[in-house]
Image (cartoon, rainbow, N blue to C red):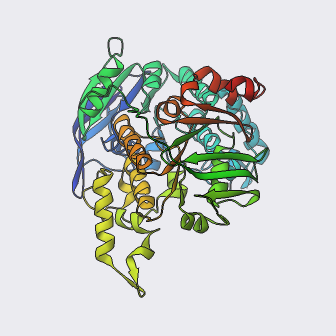
Amino acid sequence: MSFLEFSNITKTYPGVRALSDVSFGVEKGAVHGLMGENGAGKSTLIKILSGDQHADAGEISIDGKVQAYASTRNAFDNGVIVIHQELQLVPELSVAENLSLGRFPASAGVIARRRMLDDVGAKLKSAGIDIDMRRKVKTLSIGERQMVEIAKAVMLDARVIALDEPTSSLSSRESEILFKLIGRLRGEKVIIYVSHRLDEVFRLCDSLTVLRDGKLAAHHQSLKDVTRDQVVAEMVGREISDIWGFRPRKRGEVRLKVDNLSGARLRTPASFEARAGEIVGFFGLIGAGRSELMRLVFGADPRSGGTIMVDGKTVAAASPHDAIRAGIVLCSEDRKHDGIIQGRSIEENINISSRRHHTRFGVLNRASEITTAETFIKKLKVRTPSRKQDIINLSGGNQQKVILGRWLSEQNIRVLIVDEPTRGIDVGAKSEIYELLYQLAEEGMAIVVVSSELPEAMGICDRILVMCGGRISAELARDQFAEKAILAAALPDKKTPDAIAS
């Protein structure tokens, strides 16, 4: 028997069977990959492992003993730690306080802050994680917050650590720190590595399990003779030879023009434009200012200067409301915080921003809302048993589709800005989202894609603007795309933009 054993795990939710008779084992000291499309059952299996959900049938054993956790706390106390893709931190507390929650060192009933800082500092240093432990979590970037989550697992004596899409918000440098941490832990613990990134799985993992539609599609005790194409086929049930599916489009007049836009966290004013039918990419490392620039364009953050024009008309963009009325919408990089409305149905999430289109004389037309929701669920291939399903129960890829459906339900969209559109999304769903972006561009929309995945930016964009240190450092047309040149422009203290672009 393996150190960690899943035996005949079955879980059913209303209208859908999430897992069906899933069985496999993981050896002690192994880094084990867990892959599958969004909705394949990976998150459900991890939730059952962590005590967040309970299986309808089957059991989990660790070191030969059957585990039956009553709660996540119970699992935590028994050495099972899950680092979720959706971050579980207290924004108002410092890094050190977050890492000490539930186990604060105390003296005479008072938190011993000096000892807390010394303990956390020593752990972070030994792990090679460079974060100011006195900073409040709310001031950290998403990537930095992810590193804090990962640091939790390093600091605790866990027997099983599950990492759910751990690099989805990390820069290349931060990812390398994580890989080194995993290397140090290898041989001591069981590490379940959930990821859609094949390169990472083949680099880090000793073994691999693939789920599809809630069932075991494949289990590889070794990756020695397994190919990437084989795993993709196991995940999606078909061959995908070209995930990007790029196709040229006719580009029209300038649809979005940004001139000398300035605001917080931009080092210099930014200027760029996007034409009808064009997909313009923004690439850069975490902290480069890409998301901050898009929030200025959308009116989510106050701008201190510059102009924005849509189809030749100046946009006030003092608020998102102004931007939406002008035809600009933004799908934020942080789905949980800025995208989905938790506790509400798919139908409500799709219609929430376009409700005025379904209202006449102060009366809401429910039939119109239902039709809109069902139309976009079908068009975007959202996997759900019902439009009434709570959006929090959907996979990350399906949540992203619902957010896109919300904005597409608007009737005047000229510019679609998508920030990290495929973060934490499987290869099959990525292809579907790329196809949707191409269709929207072909219909005359200007698309702006912010991505920290260089292959994605190079795969789907007509032009790429590179940002570094709060400024646009280079602009390259598709026939100029070269990984080395783009990365050079994204790194500080490298060649000048003119030299890079030439």
- Left or right of 84? Residue 389 is left
- Left or right of 346? Residue 313 is right
Q: Residue at x 30, y 53 (%)?
A: 379
How far from the left and from the top, in percent, is residue 324?
Answer: 55, 64
The answer to whether one can see residue 78 in this image is yes
Q: Residue at x 74, y 38 (%)?
A: 469
In the image shown, does 56 or 480 lie closer to the viewer?
Answer: 480
Q: Residue furthest bottom?
A: 361
- Choose top left, top right, bottom left or bottom right for residue 29: top left
- Choose top left, top right, bottom left or bottom right for residue 312: bottom right
Q: Is residue 126 above or below residue 104?
A: above
How far from the left and from the top, in percent, is residue 419?
Answer: 54, 46
How far from the left and from the top, in percent, is residue 289?
Answer: 69, 43
Q: Is residue 288 above or below residue 181?
A: below
The answer to whether one can see residue 26 in this image is no
In the image shown, does 236 or 326 lie closer to the viewer?
Answer: 326
- Left or right of 379? Residue 110 is right
- Choose top left, top right, bottom left or bottom right for residue 320: bottom right
In the image shown, does 27 or 103 lie closer to the viewer?
Answer: 27
Q: Is residue 94 above or below residue 241?
A: below
In the image shown, does 456 or 103 lie closer to the viewer?
Answer: 456
- Looking at the figure, which quarter contains the C terminus? top right
Q: Residue at x 29, y 61 (%)?
A: 375
- Left or right of 318? Residue 262 is right
- Looking at the figure, which quarter contains the N terminus? top left
